[in-house]
């Protein structure tokens, strides 16, 4: 279940958006915009900033990892027809590197935005895993930090205002409404997670450092670098040697083969729970719901005693 305070956050945001829409009702809008986002979390942010008649489409199907996806012809047509293309960057959506080379004028590359908060590379683990992280070592799952979501929203609002000047005031008011909603969400998540900050845990795939660092959680390790990689015997042995003493929970994901992780959790008597950073679960219809469900998954598993 979502937090009892969560409906208040949603209600406050809806009221602010309604005020913005009412203020713009007398203006004549230009042609609606077509936005294409690489992944659902970006679409969730975009839908809270765009006008009601703008269209937001997501390339990646639900439950598919951005680390490995092959574009279809219909996807390429979407890219060609879009007014704006929203993606994190080539380190995450590797399948878009070549197709977007000819779309530079349409691109909003989020990893290049000023003002983003970045976790310290390697901060969540100090062990040798015989592999390296994306690109220069930065965790590209930047939307998992709520402050970064506001940075994204502001950049998107300004880009939309440039493309559709008649709607600029509406876009900017929606950005401010979103930022106010995120302030409330951030405070509620901080209060929820402050109770479990000392509890150690491991994640299936090393993609949560933006969330973990922002809320000061105690991630001690990960099973795999990306969802597609199968952990080797050496790494699993290493995990088995220290997780039993340092962790109470091991988190899996809905779109990865996590049998090795589940077996490890069972062997070490760790609790296990599922994290969904891509909002593959259809119940997450807003960015706030995505982050709240993530926070509740962490809280519920870490609050329970080991072996309970």
Image: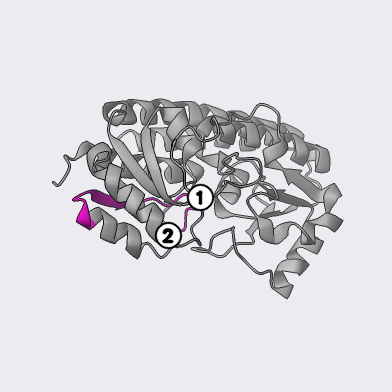
Residue topped by disc 2: 232
Residue toward you, 132 or 107? 132
| Residue occupying image coordinates x 67% and y 45% | 51
At which x and y percent is residue 284? 44, 51
In this rendering, the answer to whether 214 lies above or below 67 is above
At which x and y percent is residue 119? 54, 31
Q: Could you tell me what secondary structure mostly forms the magenta stretch?
A: loop
Residue toward you, 145 or 166? 145
**Which residue is situated farthest in the front direction here?**
234
Q: Which residues are magenta?
A: 266-282
Rendered image quadrant of residue 55: bottom right
Residue toward you, 284 or 103? 103
| Residue occupying image coordinates x 34% and y 62% | 260
At which x and y percent is residue 191? 33, 25
Q: Earlier in the sequence, mark 2 or mark 1?
A: 1
Q: Is residue 269 magenta?
A: yes
Badge 2 vs badge 1, beta-carbon distance below 8 Å: yes
Residue topped by disc 1: 130
Q: Residues within 10 Å of mark 1 (few under 14, many from 20)?
A: few
Residue 33 located left or right of residue 62: right
Camera sees residue 24: no
At which x and y percent is residue 213? 46, 30
């Amino acid at each position: 279940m979502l937090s009892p305070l969560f409906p208040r956050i949603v209600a406050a945001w809806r009221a602010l958006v309604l005020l913005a829409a009412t203020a713009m009702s007398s203006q004549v809008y230009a042609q609606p915009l077509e936005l294409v986002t690489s992944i659902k979390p970006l679409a969730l942010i975009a839908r809270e900033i765009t006008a009601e008649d703008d269209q937001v489409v997501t390339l990646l199907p639900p439950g598919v990892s951005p680390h490995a996806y092959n574009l279809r012809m219909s996807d390429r047509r979407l890219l060609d027809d879009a007014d704006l293309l929203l993606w994190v960057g080539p380190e995450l959506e590797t399948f878009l590197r070549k197709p977007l080379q000819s779309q530079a004028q349409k691109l909003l590359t989020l990893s290049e935005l000023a003002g983003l908060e970045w976790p310290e590379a390697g901060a969540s683990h100090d062990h040798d895993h015989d592999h390296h992280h994306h690109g220069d070592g930065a965790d590209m799952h930047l939307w998992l930090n709520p402050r970064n979501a506001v940075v994204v929203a502001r950049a998107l609002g300004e880009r939309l205002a440039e493309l559709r000047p008649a709607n600029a005031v509406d876009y900017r008011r929606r950005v401010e409404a979103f930022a106010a909603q995120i302030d409330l969400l951030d405070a509620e998540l901080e209060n929820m997670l402050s109770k479990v900050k000392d509890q150690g845990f491991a994640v299936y795939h090393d993609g949560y450092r933006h969330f973990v660092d922002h809320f000061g959680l105690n991630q001690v390790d990960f099973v795999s670098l990306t969802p597609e990689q199968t952990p080797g015997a050496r790494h699993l042995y290493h995990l088995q040697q220290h997780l039993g003493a340092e962790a109470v929970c091991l988190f899996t994901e809905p779109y990865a083969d996590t049998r090795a992780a589940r077996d490890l959790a069972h062997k070490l008597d760790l609790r296990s729970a599922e994290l969904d950073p891509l909002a593959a679960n259809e119940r997450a219809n807003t960015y706030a719901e995505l982050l709240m469900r993530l926070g509740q998954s962490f809280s519920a598993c870490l609050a329970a005693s080991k072996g309970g």
